[in-house]
Image (spheres, helix red, strand yellow):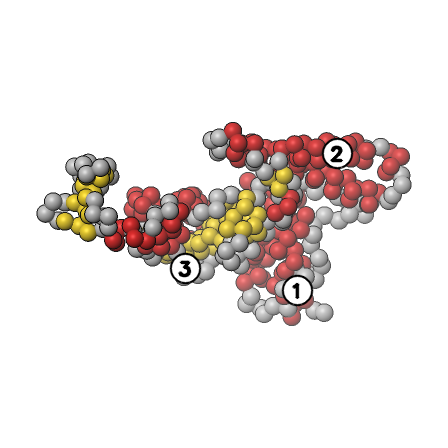
Amino acid sequence: MDVEWLVPEDHEVRAIWEFVGRMDLSGYYEEIEVVEGEAGRSATDPQLLISLWIYGYSKGVSAAREIARLCEYDPAYQWLTGLEPVNYHTLSDFRVDHKEALDELFTEVLGLLSAEGLISLERVMHDGSKVKACASGDTFRREERIRAHLELARGQVEQMGDPRAAEEVSPRVAKARQRVVREKKERLEMALEELEKIRATKSSKAEKQDVRVSMTDPQARIMKQSDGGFAPSYNVQITTDAKEKVIVGVGASQCGSDYGELVPAMEKVEEKMGRNPGQAVVDGGFISRQNILAMEQKKIDFIGPMGDGAEQSVGQLNRRGVEEAFRPEAFCYDEGNNTYTCPAGKVLADYSGRGGFSLPFLLGD
């Protein structure tokens, strides 16, 4: 197959490849130790890896596994790779090992697009999405089980270092096994660190002892899904320029709620673009008093639905066991005396002096 027929001449993936090729990537090439004509596996071209990440981000894809999967059938990704497969480990390791340099490079790309008028930032659309982690609910364990598995993993690492065990298999298989065991040990060590972070947020001793984390994806947290169920997930926040549909900010959070993610997202946009957007459009999950005040302080027009709070109030009343006969709408207000009369005939008055009934007392008790 002629890969040039996979995408048209004016496809954006061609522009990204050419643009990345004009950058100074010498720092990435200097770290490659493979020598042409000698033993060893060929290194993946940094220009290709950077182009894959930039194109993935432009399409809202920020996971190495998903980019590797798209390389198997998506024409644009296939054009970049020349129909050759790219391992997700290669993509992930490259992103992690060059995080600071790549963050700076991506910022320069966004800055250039902004300077050329391709990103206006007149209006940005921001939303969060729960992305399920590579872990199931039954991988969550308490500290004792995690430490037991960690000891087993350490024993396996020591066994892998035995030359006699390495001679029984080919070097390639031995190296693959070593990597699997090493990554398992690293995940278990990270699980203990995440366990301590969660414990720091708990108040009672019983809650601290019952803390559990996943042994396969320690940074994941149990979050509510759109179908009403719960699953180990991450809260991915994406900010997009409304006009050009270019992603100008991506972040991942361990918090199941979106309320606290808006301000950090706008700060990331300001850091990368050098200025705040004119407007920010969100859904109801981001509407809170704190966010309204924060957006006003940043001079960002805040656009989103304002609910009446009725559904939330009903939920709170149900959790507190308040009968329907004694719901707020059943109280009668006397404007002259500034009092409420409950269905049982008792009078509720405001003793706070602020008209808010923040310190209520039932008269006649």
Which of pointers 3 and 1 lies earlier in the amino acid sequence? Answer: 1
Q: Mark 3 points at which residue?
A: 242
Residue at image position (70%, 42%) is 32
Report, in whole angstroms, how far the alpha carbon at label 3 lies from the one at label 1.
28 Å
Which residue is drawn at the image coordinates 71% and 35% (left, top)? 149
Nearer the observer, 51 or 90: 90
Give the image location of residue 161, x and y in percent.
81, 33
Which of 291 and 122 lies nearest the eye of the viewer?
Answer: 291
Q: Which of marks 2 and 3 is in front?
A: 2
Say what secondary structure mark 2 lies in: helix
C-alpha gap between disc 2 and disc 3: 51 Å
Q: Residue 152 carries which label?
A: 2
Q: For this rendering, which residue is in front, 144 or 334?
A: 334
Mark 1: amino acid = Tyr
User: Any mark on residue 73, and which?
Assistant: 1
Residue shown at the point (65%, 40%) measured from the top left:
215
Circle 3 SS class: loop
As drawn, 274 above or below 66: above
